[in-house]
Each structure stands twice: as structure tokens, then as C-alpha cells.
Amino acid sequence: MSSWTTHPAHPAAPEAATLLREYLAEMVRRWHRRPERPDEVDAALAESPSHDLVAPTGLLLLAHHDGNLAGCAGLRWRPRWAELTRVYLRPAHRGAGGGAALLAAVEAHAGAAGADRIRLDTRTDLVEARALYARHGYAEIPAYNDDRYAQHWFEKLLPARVDGTAAPR
């Protein structure tokens, strides 16, 4: 039986930086439908930085599968909600429940922080990601941002906290 674990990490930490670079390299490859060039990945890192995925503005979780670095997911805190970003699993770990593990972890963190929903944007070519979100209760919604790469927007309402209060930020 395989096991998944997640833990927060700073985006500049070596494991996190490696995964974020792999994530953006895949986004460039899939967008252009060709191999990425190093300068394109560097440009994507500059255009879409992850430095805000730390307290108090966000969170980055790393996932390990059977002890091996396998993926990541980030949250950006907004008033009363959280934005999901940087969901990535290394190809060797796909299909083994990592997407579900990452979503469960970010949802738990978002709920604990007082968010009442999680929103995200994604692209048409990221078919697997859109299917994952739909399987886990995320519903398509109208655009909530004007990101030039966004083509689909999703939202999931989180369960109310037992005590009915929002956690402080």
C-alpha cells in the first residue's frame, strides 16, 4: 500500500524550487505543444512567481509518495476564500492518488485558516486537472479573474467550521 504525506515548504527551498520549475516547464510544454526552452521556463518563473506562497499571503505544500518527492500545491489567501494554484504531480506519481491527497490537504489548510471556499483557474489543455477538480466537488463558475492563460474557473465550498467562527489570518 502506498502512502502520501504533505508538509508546508518555502517556495525557495530546494525541493520546492525544483517542483515549481518542473510545474512551469510542463505548463510551457503543454501551452506551446513542443519542448520548452530554458529561457521560456525562466520567463514563466518571472511572470508568475511563487514567492507569495508563504505566510501571511499563502501556503505551499509539498507531497511525498512513499517517501519520494512527488508534487506540490499552493494556496493564496483572499478575504474569506483561498485560491488554489501550482497543483503538480511528477509523471511517475500520477494515477496513484496524489491529486486527491493534495486537494484534501489544501482544503484542510484553507478551512483551518477560515476560508469558506477555494477557487482556481485552469486551461482547456489541462484535461486531467479539470477532471480531478470535477471529481472532487469543484464546480465551474464564471471568470473571477482576467489571467491571460485562464480558460476555466472552478470553486468548491468548504464545510462550515464546527464552532461557526472563522479562523484569524
Image (spheres, helix red, strand yellow):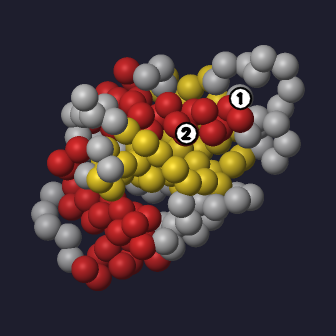
The residue to which callout 1 is attached is 116
Q: Determine whether, in the image, residue 134 is placed left or right of residue 68.
A: right
Which mark, by number, is residue 81?
Answer: none
Q: Residues within 10 Å of mark 1 (few under 14, many from 20)?
A: many
Q: CA distance from mark 2 to mark 1?
A: 13 Å
**Residue under the image location 23 percent in, 40 percent down:** 94
Q: Determine whether, in the image, residue 130 is placed left or right of residue 157.
A: left
- Element type where label 1 sits in the image: loop
**Residue under the image location 59 percent in, 60 percent down:** 53
**Residue under the image location 72 percent in, 46 percent down:** 78
> For this rendering, which residue is in front, 9 or 37?
9
| Comes first in the chain, label 2 or label 1 | 2
Residue 142 visible (yes or no): no
The location of residue 24, given as percent across then percent down, is: 34, 63
Q: Determine whether, in the image, residue 106 is placed left or right of residue 79.
A: left
Above or below: residue 113 compared with residue 165: below
The residue to which callout 2 is attached is 106
> For this rendering, which residue is in front, 147 or 15?
15
Q: Determine whether, in the image, residue 44 is placed left or right of residue 30.
A: right
The location of residue 72, given as percent across then percent down, is: 42, 51
Residue 95 visible (yes or no): yes
Q: Which marked residue is nearer to the observer: mark 2 or mark 1? A: 2
Q: Residues within 10 Å of mark 2 (few under 14, many from 20)?
A: many
The location of residue 83, given as percent across then percent down, is: 59, 44
The location of residue 109, given as percent across then percent down, is: 63, 39
Above or below: residue 162 compared with residue 92: above
Amino acid on which disc 2 is placed: Val
Amino acid on which disc 1 is placed: Asp
Q: Quadrant of the N terminus?
A: top left
